[in-house]
Amino acid sequence: MQRDPLDPKRLIREAYRIEGIVIAECRSIFLDWALSLPDGQDTQAAIGVMIARYAPDNPEHPMTEVLRDGTRAISVPRRRGGWRSRPRES
């Protein structure tokens, strides 16, 4: 089988194959998958590809829900804390 650059560990693929998987397990798998994406990879685009690939045949699967949640969570800007949120001194 050829290596998929957007799912190099086949985490998303395997999540859809696990019978009885629950949303908490899917979230954990999603995080591992997102952290394993290549540097510079557009995460939104990668999630979109995974949704297009798996959601049509698995609309009620918990991983489909997690992927869709991932698109919403990433698109919401968040306040940064720590030193990045402090004004720079001149």
Image (cartoon, rainbow, N blue to C red):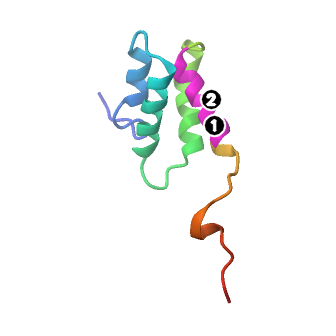
Q: Does the magenta stretch include residue 62?
A: yes
In percent of the image, x 58 and y 65: which residue is there?
Answer: 82
Q: Position of residue 67 (x, y in %)?
A: 57, 30
In percent of the image, x 43 and y 28: which residue is there?
Answer: 12
Instruction: Label 1: state its secondary structure.
Output: helix
Screen quadrant of the N terminus: top left
Q: Where is residue 59 in the image (x, y as percent from the top left)?
A: 60, 14
In percent of the image, x 42 and y 31: which residue is there?
Answer: 29
Decide which of 86, 66 is in the foreground and name it.
86
Q: Name the residue under label 1.
A: 71
Q: Does the magenta stretch include residue 57?
A: no
In percent of the image, x 36 and y 30: which residue is there?
Answer: 10
Within the image, what quadrant is residue 66 found in?
top right
**Vertical arrangement, residue 54 with respect to residue 43, above or below:** above
Name which residue type carries label 2. Arg
Cα distance between the residues tagged 2 and 1: 5 Å
Magenta-tinted stretch: 61-73
Number of the label disc, if any, that sits on residue 68: 2
Outermost residue toward the bottom in this view: 90
Number of the label disc, if any, that sits on residue 47: none
Q: Where is residue 40 in the image (x, y as percent from the top left)?
A: 49, 55
Name which residue type carries label 1. Thr
Question: 66 left or right of 37?
Answer: right
User: Badge 1: how crowded within 10 Å, few (<14), some, or many (20+)?
Assistant: some
Instruction: Label 2: state its secondary structure.
Output: helix
Outermost residue toward the top in this view: 19
Task: Kindly report the secondary structure that dominates the magenta region of the rendered protein.
Answer: helix
Question: 35 left or right of 44?
Answer: left
Question: 41 left or right of 9?
Answer: right
| Residues at discs 2 and 1 in contact (Cβ within 8 Å) | yes
